[in-house]
Amino acid sequence: MGVLTGRTALVTGAGRGIGRGIAERLGRDGARVAVHYGSSEAAAKETVAAIEAAGGSAFAIRAELGRPGDAEALWEEFDRHAEGLDILVNNAGIGGAPPIEEIDEATYDQVFAVNVRAPFFIVRHGLERLRDGGRIINISSGLARTAVFPHQIAYAMTKAALDVFSRDLSKVLGRRGVTVNSVAPGIIDTDNTAELLHGTEGGWARAAEISALGRVGETADVADVVAFLASDAGRWVTGSWVDATGGSLT
Ligand code: NAP
C-alpha cells in the first residue's frame, strides 16, 4: 500500500522529462496515473510501461495543448479510462521562448496558450471531476522570480501568470479541501535543457554553479516535492510557491 493508493492522478506532458519523473513517482506511491502526452506517443507508452513494471497502474491519453478546445478534448480522453480525479499536475509546457528582439506575436501567443491558457482551462473543465480533498500542482519555474536568464522574458511571464493562478485558485477551492500550489524547478536535465547543458561548451558546469548545491537538478528532485504536496502530509500547504531550484535563487 502506497500513500496514494486509491487516488487517481493526471500528469500533463508525462511522456518525457519532469512530467515522466512525476508520473512514475506518483505511480510508485500507489496512484493510478493518467499519462498525458501531445506528440510523444511512444514515450508516453514507455512511462505507462515503467509504472506498470513497478507494480502500479497507468494509462496514456493524448491531447494537443495550445489550441481551442484542447482541455475539453483532454477530459474526453480521460473519461474513457477513469471516473473522477484526486491529483492534477499541470506540467506540460513550452520550456522557453525567443528573446524580445526576436519573438513574433504567433510564438508569444502559442507559449501563453500552452503554458497558461491550457492549465487554466484544464482546471476549468476538470473541476467537476476533481474530488474534494484533491490536489492541484502547477509546474512553474525559478525564472518567474529571478532574471538570471533575462532573454527568457516571455517564458518567465507565463510562469508568473501560472503562479497567480495557483495563489488565487487556492482560495477559490480551499473550502472543498483542495490544495493548489506552484512548484518551481531550477535547471533540470531534460530534453528542454539539452542545448544549454550538453550543446554548449562548459554549459553543464555553469548550470551546476547556479545552484547552491552545486549540481544540475534531476527530474526526481522535482518529483519528490510534488509527491509530498500530493500526499496527506502536504494537506496544510496551499497557495504556495514551492522553491525546487536547489537554492538557485539565493
Ligand atoms: P520537456 O522535456 O521539453 O517536455 C515538455 C513536455 O510538455 C512534454 O512532455 C510535451 O509532451 C509537453 N508539451 C509541450 N508542448 C505541448 C503541447 N502543445 N501539447 C501537449 N503537450 C505538450 O520539458 P521539461 O523540461 O520536462 O519541463 C516540464 C515542465 O517543467 C515545463 O512546464 C517547464 O516549463 C518546467 N520547467 C522545466 C525546467 C527545466 O530545467 N527542465 C525548469 C523549470 C521549469 P509531448 O512531447 O508529448 O508533446
Image (cartoon, helix red, strand yellow):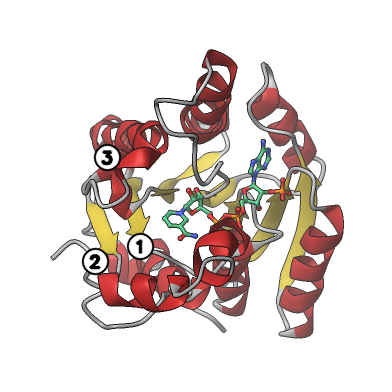
Residue at x 29%, y 83% (from the top left corner): 214
Q: Residue at x 35, y 72 (%)?
A: 206
- Badge 2 marks a residue whose secondary structure is loop
Please identify, in this view, whether the residue under mark 3 or under mark 1 is nearer the observer. Answer: 1
Can you give x and y, in whole percent of width and height, for residue 51 in the image?
72, 75
- Residue topped by disc 1: 186
How far, Cα to Cα, is label 3 from label 1? 28 Å
x, y percentage for residue 100? 39, 26
| Residue 174: image tag | 3
Residue 7 appears in the figure = no
Disc 1 element: loop
Would you say residue 155 is visible in this rendering? yes
Q: Residue at x 66, y 32 (%)?
A: 65
Query: Would you say the residues marked 2 and 1 are in contact, meaning their CB atoms lie under 8 Å apart?
Result: yes
Determine whether the beta carbon of the residue marked 1 sits less than 8 angstroms from the nearest atom of ligand 1. Answer: yes
- In three-dimensional space, the C-alpha distance between marks 3 and 2, rounded to whole angstroms, equals 30 Å
Q: Amino acid at mark 2?
A: Ser
CB under 8 Å between discs 3 and 2: no
Secondary structure state at the residue bearing disc 3? helix
Question: Depth check: 56 or 69 in front?
Answer: 69
- Identify residue type, mark 1: Gly
Task: Name which residue type carries label 3.
Answer: Gly
User: On the image, numbered disc 2 is attached to which residue?
Assistant: 248
Q: Is 143 displayed left or right of 219 in the figure?
A: left
* Label 2: how many Cα within 10 Å (few below 14, some 14–19, many 20+): many
**Among numbered discs 3 and 2, the one appearing first in the sequence:** 3
